[in-house]
Amino acid sequence: MQYPPALEEALRKEGIDPRTYKGKSYPYIRVNPRSELALLEHSELEMCLGMNLEGFPWTPHYRVRGKRHLNKDPYFLMGSYYRQDLASAAPVYALAPEGGELIADVCSAPGGKTFLIADWAPVREVFALDSSSRRFARLQQNIAKYGVTNVRAVLGDASSRDYAMGLSFDRILVDAPCPGEGNTSRLYGKHLRKWYSVDDWWQPLLELNYRILKTAFENLRDNGVLVYSTCTFQTEFNEELVLRFLEEVGGRLAKVSIPNFLLRTPHHESMYRIYPRDNRTKGLFFAKIVKN
C-alpha cells in the first residue's frame, strides 16, 4: 500500500518501514465480566466461541486465532465480550486502578479503556468525559450494551476545569486526540486523506492536548496518578509535550514494566512506546505522571 509522503516520513523517523508497517496482526477480545461467558473455563470458552484464545498474565484480554468477522458474532452483538486491541490495555495497566477510588477518563468515548478501568478493580466510580456529542452517544450506547454500572458519562470539554464539578480524582487517564498513525486499522479512507491535506494539519491538536493534560493535573488529588497516552509516534505529541508539561507545571515520571510485553523507550527512559512490529498490536505511546 502506498502511503502519503508525510505519513511515510513520520513512520521512517521512528525506524518503521511503511511497506511492512501493518504486518501480521490478530484481533483481541476481552470477556465482559457481567456476561455468562465469564463463568466458563478457558477450554469451554474456546469451544463456545469457536476461537483459539491466547491469554496474558497482566490483562484479561485474549488474542484470537481462527475465527474472523467478530463484529457479526452474536456474542459480540449482545455484549458478551469487547473487541479491544491489547496495546490499549497498557495505559490502564500503568494507571493501576484500586478499589474504592474515584477515577476519570477524560477522552473516553467509545469507552473501551473506561470499561477496562471500571472492571480492573472495584473502583467507586469512573467519570467518563467526552466533548463530541456523536462519540458521547456511542459511549452511552456501549454503557447500556455492556451493563456497566460504575461509570458516569458526562458530555463536556476536557480542557476546561469545570468538567470535574468540584471533584478531585485519585487517578486520571488522558487518552488524547492525535494524528493516529499508530492505530494501523485507521490508516484508510478519511483518516488517510488527512495526511494528503495541508502540511502539519494536526498542529492545533498540540495546544489542545497540553490544555487537557494541564486541566487533568489540576483535577488530580495530591499523590494521584495521571497517565497520558496517544496513538501517534510523533515526538511533538509525546515526549516533547510531556517534558514541557513537567517543566512548566510539575509532577514526576514513574517507571512501568509489563510482563512479557515489549515497551520501547527510544526518546526517554520513562516514556513508553508500543510498536506494531513488537507485540502484533497497534501502536501507542504512554507516560505515567505522579502529582507530588
Image (tube, grey):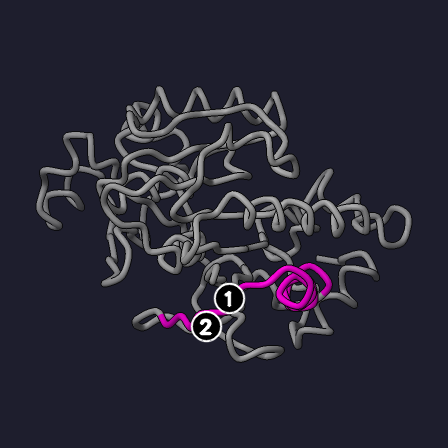
61 versus 141 height, above or below:
below
**Residue wearing tag 2:** 263
- Residue beneath the point at 59% across and 79% down: 266
Amino acid carrying mark 1 in the image: Ile
Marker disc for residue 228? none
The x and y percentages for residue 165 are: 51, 28
Range covered by the magenta-colored residues: 236-257
Horizontal placement of 75 versus 173: left or right? left
Left-right relation of 210 to 128: right
Instruction: Assess whether mark 1 and mark 2 are in contact (beta carbons under 8 angstroms).
Output: yes
Q: Position of residue 279 (x, y in %)?
A: 43, 67
Residue type indicated by callout 2: Leu
Alpha-carbon distance for marks 2 and 1? 6 Å
Q: Residue at x 31, y 39 (%)?
A: 118
Q: Position of residue 1 (x, y in %)?
A: 70, 57
Residue 240 lies in quadrant: bottom right
Is 106 placed left or right of 26 in the picture?
A: right
Is residue 223 located in the magenta-colored stretch of the structure? no
Badge 1 local density, few (<14 within 10 Å), some, or many (20+)? many
Q: Quadrant of residue 29?
A: top left
The residue nearer to you, when weighing 216 against 117, is 216
Residue placed at 66% from the left, 55% from the top? 181
Look at the numbered disc 2 and give the secondary structure of its residue. loop
User: Which class describes the residues within 10 Å of circle 2: few (<14), some (14-19), or many (20+)?
Assistant: many
Image position of 203 (left or right of 141): right
- Is 249 within the magenta? yes
Count of numbered circles on the image: 2
Q: Which residue is mark 1?
A: 274
Question: On screen, 193 above or below 267?
Answer: above
Q: What residue is at 60 percent from the left and 57 percent from the top?
A: 182
Q: Position of residue 45 (x, y in %)?
A: 15, 43
Q: Quadrant of residue 247?
A: bottom right
